[in-house]
Image (cartoon, grey):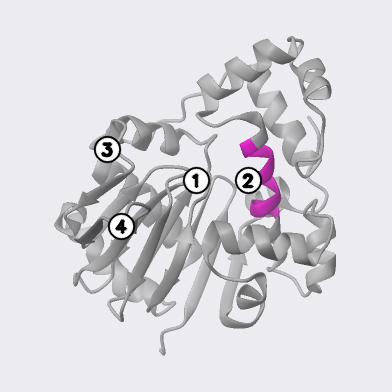
Amino acid sequence: MATQNFLHLWDDRFLYITPAIQSGLTARSSATLLASVSGHPFTLEAVDGTRVHCTAALVAPHVSRRLDVDGCGLLSLNLDPASSAYRMLARRMGGHGIQPIDARRFGALRDDFGPAQCGALSNERLQSLSAKMVEAITESPELQAPLDPRIDRVLQAIRAHAGQIALRDLAAVACLSPDRLTHLFAEQVGVSVKRYALWTKVRRTVQQFTGQRSLTDVALVSGFTDAAHMSRTFQRYFGLPPSFLASQVRVTADEHASHAWGQNAPLH
């Protein structure tokens, strides 16, 4: 089966698989685990010009980098800031913005990298692979460590309103003052309320490409003022225009992702 670009969406993560990519400077709210498919190195360049050649790497949230994958194939696993897997990897990084990893760390999991790039693995197999990749780095099973229930309610409210909800309203959802919510949210999630709200818009944008929508419709459903605003933000996050997803990427989502990030995500 010929290789192409794939994007697999789950509620707390997504996996982008591509044979090659050269991106400009990008940064996003997710933690990113990168792995070469072939085992040959790719290049990460930090904002200060420092270059790292590696076969796998962890990139912390909001760390700017350029990426050059010249035909070796890449798995890019992006973990939502509110996920347990994100928090496990954050502890593993210990404050490093870009942390190179030897891909041999993944062991027998690498046998699935090639089939994943060719689109030969089921959604369930890919989801299991993503979890096991995290476990290979953290050296422990992925545990579902719950957040403070007040913060969980706030996260659901942000998702339900596509990031367009005032801080005072979120504070009311949590039964906290705005200042207390701001501090507790950053402590629990690892990013600010404002940054998570923007991430929600971007993540919802990605979700809409599982259907046939115009870019204008995608922008409005995702909480952006117009398609141009969405495109600028998307380019800053991923180094690719939204139109690339529509035309060059096979996008799939499971039921949980559709429920959490779809047009009618519920408010709990």
Task: Give the answer, above or below, for where 96 lies relative to 243.
Answer: above
Q: Which badge, 2 or 4, is on the more N-terminal residue?
A: 4
The tag earlier along the polypeptide, 2 or 3, is: 3
Look at label 4 and name its amino acid. Answer: Gly
Span of residues in magenta:
195-204
Residue at the front extreme, as displayed: 48
Residue in view at x 38 percent, y 48 percent: 131
Q: Which residue is mark 4?
A: 49
Query: Which amino acid type is shown beneath numbered disc 2?
Result: Trp
Residue 16 coordinates in the image, percent (x, y): 47, 65
Q: Earlier in the sequence, mark 1 or mark 2?
A: 1
Q: Residues within 10 Å of mark 4 (few under 14, many from 20)?
A: few
Question: Quadrant where the C terminus lies?
Answer: top right
**Hey, which quadrant is residue 218 in on the image?**
bottom right
Q: Is residue 23 left or right of residue 208?
A: left
Compared across the picture, whether 183 is left or right of 15 comes to right
Residue 199's disc number: 2
Residue occupied by mark 1? 30
Residue 199 counted in the magenta span: yes
Answer yes or no: is residue 44 visible: yes
Between marks 2 and 4 in the image, the one whose residue lies nearer the viewer: 4
